[in-house]
Amino acid sequence: MIGVVLWSDFEDQKAVFWCEDHGDLAYYDAAQDHAAEHNLLNAGDMVEFDLSIEGKIRRARNATVIKPKVCNGLQEHLRATAAKTDTAPSTAASGDVVAFPQKIANSAPMRRAHNG
């Protein structure tokens, strides 16, 4: 799998990856990855890794940096986008409401036409 480091902690040697399949985030722990070269992973680095699922958590193993700093500023961009989304007015309150006709009592059900 290929992903981008969203967050990393040098002291704990942990990181969180945003995966190319846009599924759940993958969590990396170098201390539990016996095959790890203990690369320093920085936010914005593109990494390649093996993915496994433990319960409901996606775990990354064997992480290697493919291209450092390829997505610098990604965290700030995501935060800014989230802030805009959180403060944007709700479309339900300002949008047009389309009323659907009420079901008429004692009316026959509509039937689908079949070709064939």
Image: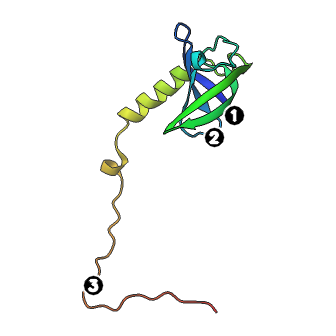
Judge depth for marks 1 and 3 and give the one in front.
1
Earlier in the chain: of badge 2 and badge 3, it is 2
Q: Residue placed at 71% from the left, 16% from the top? A: 68
**Residue with the mark numbered 3:** 104
Q: What's the residue type where badge 1 is placed?
A: Met
Q: Residue placed at 37% from the left, 88% from the top? A: 109
Judge depth for marks 2 and 1 and give the one in front.
1
| Residue 63 x/y as whole percent | 68, 22
Label 3 near label 2: C-beta < 8 Å?
no
For marks 2 and 3, give the CA distance: 47 Å
Label 1 near label 2: C-beta < 8 Å?
yes
Disc sitting over residue 100 in the figure: none
- At mark 2, the secondary structure is loop
Give the mark count: 3
- At mark 1, the secondary structure is loop
Disc sitting over residue 21 in the figure: 2
For marks 2 and 1, give the CA distance: 8 Å
Q: Residue placed at 57% from the left, 37% from the top? A: 53
**Residue with the mark numbered 1:** 1
Q: Residue placed at 56% from the left, 12% from the top? A: 13
Graded by Cα atoms within 10 Å as few (under 14), some (14 to 19) or many (20 or more), the crowding at tag 3 reads: few
Q: What's the residue type where badge 3 is placed?
A: Ile
